[in-house]
Amino acid sequence: MKIELSERVAVVTGASRGIGRAVAVALAAAGASVACVASKEANAQATVDAIRAAGGRAEPFGCDVGRPADITALADAVAKAFGRVDILVNNAGVTRDGLLMRMSEEDWDTVLDTNLKGAFLVVKAFSRHLLRSKCGRVINIASVVGISGNGGQANYAASKGGLIAFTKSVSKEIGSRGITANAVAPGFITTDMTDALTAEQRDAMVKGITLGRTGTPDDVAGVVTWLASDLAAYVTGQVIAVDGGLRL
């Protein structure tokens, strides 16, 4: 069955590259109009251009998800540009890896403010728009480390574990209005964030993946698009790992 998202509006944060860009392009390919959000509007333009080149509709927006005023302005701007919001994908995220004993308070706060508090602020700002939709979807991009933890990523794992708990709570609060809320937990996905790893580190990681390969942003985008569609209308409060069997 073909996924059909025409007449729906999606907001994707962190849409300038990697998973966010793949999600925005996939949602547009399914027919959704997409608000592509990045820290700076210019950073989202390449994603918008790719969507438009394929015949889709998209607009770029700049927003620092750690700043409440920016998010309020974003919600108003998106509603003005598109008239409605049906799908909200929280993908914006940062890493500041380091051993716990050496991790600065600033690095802890930066990751938690962006990855967890940012998602809270975005959902809160767009909630009134989602409540007007008959097919509202909240999809938060978490991580398998939010389930299993990971040495050297105490801040990142805490932010993603918190995001998973937040997602489940949101699903219970808004489910009575027909809105679903789910989390997608990617495993080892090849993106700019993973380019800093050495070849030895990548090889060691792949050995633990059942499917024997790293994932791609498109692997994640496919699951997000399904969750955004009517095919997943009875799925809520779930955490779907897209990890190739990494946690088995």
Image (tube, rainbow, N blue to C red):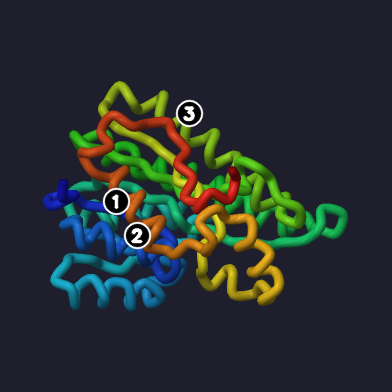
Which tag is nearer the camera, tag 2 or tag 3? 2
Give the residue furthest to the top: 176
Q: Observer-nearest residue: 104 or 171? A: 171
Q: Residues within 10 Å of mark 3 (few under 14, many from 20)?
A: some
The local secondary structure at tag 3 comes to: helix
Residue at 40% of width from left, 62% of height from top? 20
- Is residue 194 depicted above or below 80 in this figure? below
Separation of marks 2 and 1 at Cα, in angstroms: 7 Å
Residue 127 in view (yes/no): yes
Amino acid type shown at disc 2: Val
Separation of marks 2 and 3 at Cα, in angstroms: 24 Å
Mark positioned earlier in the residue sequence (2 or 1): 2
Q: Quadrant location of the C terminus?
A: top right
Give the residue number, with chain letter if any, for mark 3.
169
Amino acid type shown at disc 1: Thr
The local secondary structure at tag 2 comes to: helix
- Is residue 92 depicted above or below 51 in this figure? above
How many numbered markers are drawn?
A: 3
Separation of marks 1 and 3 at Cα, in angstroms: 22 Å
- Is residue 204 depicted above or below 5 in this figure? below
Q: Which mark is residue 225?
A: 1
Q: Observer-nearest residue: 96 or 61? A: 96
Which tag is nearer the camera, tag 1 or tag 3? 1
Mark positioned earlier in the residue sequence (2 or 3): 2
Are the residues at dot 2 and dot 1 in contact (C-beta closer than 8 Å)? yes
Amino acid type shown at disc 3: Ser
Give the residue number, with chain letter if any, for mark 2.
23
Q: Position of residue 35 (x, y in %)?
A: 28, 60
- Is residue 247 depicted above or below 132 in this figure? below
Q: Quadrant of residue 96?
A: bottom right
Residue at 64% of width from left, 61% of height from top? 207
